[in-house]
Amino acid sequence: MRSERSALVIGASGSIGTAVAQRLLADSRYDTVFCVSRAADPPAALDNAAQLRWLPCGGSPGDIALAREEMGDAVGRLARVVICSGILHQGDRGPEKSLEQLDADWMQTLFYANSITPMLWLQALAKGLGRKQECVIAALSARVGSIGDNKLGGWYGYRASKSALNMLLQTAAVELARRAPATKLIAFHPGTTDTALSRPFQGNVPAGKLFSPDFVAARLLAIMDTARPDAALSYLDWDNKTIPW
Ligand SMILES: NC(=O)c1ccc[n+]([C@@H]2O[C@H](COP(=O)([O-])OP(=O)(O)OC[C@H]3O[C@@H](n4cnc5c(N)ncnc54)[C@H](OP(=O)(O)O)[C@@H]3O)[C@@H](O)[C@H]2O)c1
């Protein structure tokens, strides 16, 4: 028998997002899996699942409010939220190697997609989360967002947008500890994963260290299953190891 728990994946047509959605759809603990995407239709891998609710959604606050409305009372039954959206490169824009390459428009694009959009979703969901509702929320961050770990430099905009995401999540965790104390937040580093996002940068990845999206999805969902709902933020990698801020 299915329970009355639901799950939400944001950025569901991305490689990690689709893999997470596939695993949630195969898990009988969730009667509805909401999948938010800029794409009009689900990828073939998700197409046939009965529990799937595909919510096409742009990035504006109005678009997000509309998609949130579609979810209705199911927000009060959310047990898992996985925010898998993000960008690293687009067209001829990509990670900067020097200060000379900084570009204000590109930095704004990165911050909007990587830091602001996840928070607009948290904002949209916060009101619906009950005080006793155990809900684990993971946002795909990245190890390069760690200030303590930054010995290599470069990748200014992407790094900073993920550091900002981490700070925004920590600030939300402090607030949610009062408003929805049974939530858990995770800023998650998947490791280098074989997706369109990392493809141009896979050259130096050691053998055995380029993960499949399904491997990463399995690791993340297992970590979410064992996380204590303490309303705190953890910054974790795919191996469940804590990353320094
Ligand atoms: N792959 C890696 O090695 C790696 C390493 C560290 C961290 N990450 C993080 O993992 C997350 C998932 O990435 P991925 O590797 O699965 O890449 P991906 O296949 O490119 O998926 C990223 C998804 O993000 C959404 N997206 C793209 N551009 C966007 C924009 N401008 N505004 C809002 N959403 C946008 C899209 O989802 P929809 O089309 O469904 O809207 C896209 O499919 C990202 O946050 C990334 O930073 C990845």
Image (cartoon, rainbow, N blue to C red):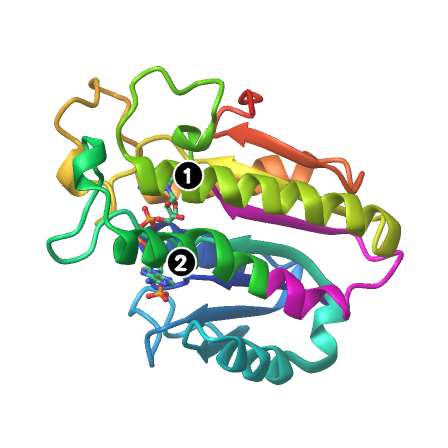
Q: Position of residue 66 (x, y in %)?
A: 56, 84
The answer to whether 226 appears left or right of 44 in the picture is: right
Hey, which quadrant is residue 226 in on the image?
top right
Answer with mark 1 or mark 2, whichever residue precedes in sequence. 2
Residue 191 vs 134, above or below: the answer is above
Q: Is mark 2 within 8 Å of ligand 1?
A: yes
The quarter of the rendered structure image containing the N terminus is bottom right
Which residue was labeled with disc 2? 113
Q: Position of residue 111 (x, y in %)?
A: 41, 53
Point 37% across, 30% down: residue: 191
Magenta part of the protein: which range?
121-141
Q: Nearer the viewer, residue 164 or 46?
A: 164
Q: Position of residue 134 (x, y in %)?
A: 79, 52
Point 49% across, 37% down: residue: 163
Residue 172 vs 194, above or below: the answer is below
Circle 1 SS class: helix
